[in-house]
Amino acid sequence: MAKDVRKQIERLREVIRQHDYCYYVLNQPKISDRQYDKLFAELKKLEAANPQLITPDSPTQRVSERPLEGFATVRHAVPMLSMDNTYNSDELRAFDERVKKQLGSQDYDYVIELKIDGLAISLRYEEGILTTAATRGNGEVGDDVTANVRTIRAVPLVLMDSGKIPAVLEVRGEVYMPTSSFVELNRLRAEAGEPPFANPRNAAAGSLKLLDARITAARNLSFFAYATGQVSEPLAANHYESLQRFKKLGLPVNPNIKKARDINEAIEICDSFSEKRSSLDYQIDGMVIKINRFDQRDILGATGRAPRWCISYKFAAEQAETVVESIDVQVGKSGILTPVANLTPVLLAGTTVKRASLHNFDELKRLGVGQGDTVVIEKAGEIIPQVIEVKSKATATVPVFKIPKTCPICGSAAVKDEEGVYIRCINRDCPGQLKERLKYFAGRGQMDIEHLGPALIDQLIENGLVENFADLYKLNEVQLAGLERMAEKSAANVIKAIEESKTRPLWRLIAALGIRHIGGQSAQILAEHFGSLGALMKAGEEELAEIDQIGPTMAKSIYEYFHDPENQSVIEKLLDAGVRPEQPKIQRSKKLAGKTIVVTGTLENFSRQQAEQAIRQAGGKSSSSVSKKTDFVLAGENPGSKLDKARKLGVEVIDEKQFMTMIQ
């Protein structure tokens, strides 16, 4: 039987690797995401039941459950040099002349690649297995980010090829964040009241330097291979053939790589992608032109910092000039005042831009933007329109926009954050904040109340029908039907949608409350940990800070929110109105039902969060501290002081194997 299970696990691993290959290397997925997830879940279930068969190269082992304390350093076997830049065709032709002169021949060709705007990485494979991933660093020494890179599904943990795989193969490439993922990440950060990333490159770089690989895994990074470092035996005689070999090994290579007979053809290819780049789902800031043959690269050599056999051709950022017609101040759901420039409409990177963020008042002051000024705008990361400079002032006497001392909506005092850049309206009853809070509460990622759009919310506030979240659940069809553009059927649809939202999952309600720093992902962690809104509201700040991925800043925000009398009153009204978030289904275990369990140390098959969730699903209660009321302490590796306290108090200590039998 054990032999059959081993074969089944090995078969599933191979099938999943083949589907990863089809998706990331061939760009030809053979199954749907749902079918893939089903295969993955089946493998995970088999491995959980047979932990002795889990291997580090299994597709299920990409995400480390242990946060790092810091990054070790790695010395590159072959230095990761930077590249010289060019900015026009004349400079490219000058580069070509230098190549021709040094080679003493015109018998050479080029490979043209897209310059992905991400983070350079070096992957080291030994006997076909990924052992180390390191950032470029200073070119000689980089950071060991293996745990985070393993979470990237485009990076194979094991190489595949019917031919011989080199004993040592260092693959150089670019880790990047797809544009679609970047947009979604910034949306989630905005929900959580966190500042957005400026561009996908910053987002990718920041994600790779996180100490908790589980957060990196949620960032949906990807990877393209483009070169080799140390290799125990050559893959091919030239670069283009080497890239083709990469594909056979299961390494993703950008599909837009081209060969060019000469520099004129290379320039044509570069120019063509300058126009195509807006259609790609990743950011590029130029092209890379490389000599194809390795023996000719050896002749050309390198300077102290860059190879002489390649050059970067940088695209000019797409910019446009326009006039600032006015500057508005927007009020966010947490009271943040944000300056926004209203522009004379202008076409930029394929879209008509009418507004551009000025981010905050420190940035506005630095730029010196005023009404009537002619400004230069560009899209940050090809996405977010922003003002980058004032081209000319309207007149010498037009003043720079003044930092508001009061809220533009309610007139209350506006105060700057301590040690921060944001200015906030301090009036909690500000209609501007209320509007944004209600829009957020009803949004798809939160309570998902259909038909309750911005225009209707405006009317509800203006007519005094809604002053907080709970008031939504007091509305009736007669009240709504009396509003502008609201017929009886429309009113009925809104009331039905509000009624349906009463039983949304717990995490959605937590997210919808708009607690500072808490978005959808954090809300799910809290819902899984506490299991009920009441338990969360009673939690102490210290207990909250101990939860994985929460930490002290978020814990303080959560604690303060639920201990604010006004917030408590609104939540009480929500519950009185019949809002009953769905509770997780509990499959009670006879051995754990009603028992209090403390988890300590590192477990093999569970993160702490997963173990605590399993305890709750079995009808038990998870606690963070050991006391006389504790029934069991589940101890893994390096349990620490909690184990000592349990022994001192005579609390029964169980290991992971015992725990797994108890929750079944």
Image: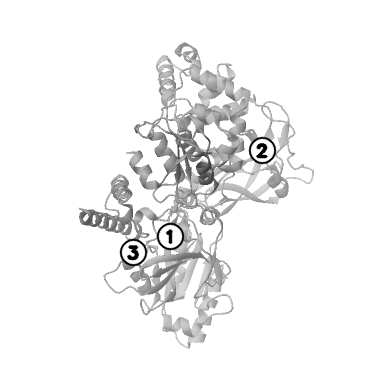
Please give the label number shown on residue 223: 1
Q: Give SS at disc 2.
A: strand
Left/right of residue 374 with respect to residue 117 in the rendered view: right
Mark closer to the chain start, 3 or 2: 3
Residue 383 versus residue 347: which sits nearer the camera?
Answer: 383
Q: Nearer the viewer, mark 3 or mark 2?
A: 3
Percent coordinates x, y for residue 75 in the rendering = 53, 71
Task: Decide if residue 344 is in sight here.
Answer: no
Disc 2 + disc 1, Cβ < 8 Å: no
Residue 114: image quadrant is bottom left
Please give the label number shown on residue 482: none
Tell me the CA gap for discs 1 and 3: 12 Å
Q: Is residue 363 positioned above or below 231 on the image? A: above
Residue 62: image quadrant is bottom left
Residue that numbered label 3 is attached to: 250
Percent coordinates x, y for residue 86 in the rendering = 56, 70
Task: Decide if residue 504 is in sight here.
Answer: yes
Mark 2 crowdedness (10 Å alpha carbons): few <14, some 14-19, many ≥20:
some
Q: Which amino acid type is marked by label 3?
A: Gly
State the residue at coordinates (42%, 84%).
Answer: 295
Q: Which amino acid type is marked by label 1?
A: Phe
Q: Give SS at disc 1.
A: strand
Mark closer to the chain start, 2 or 1: 1
Mark closer to the chain start, 1 or 3: 1
Residue that numbered label 2 is attached to: 326
Tell me the CA gap for discs 2 and 1: 42 Å
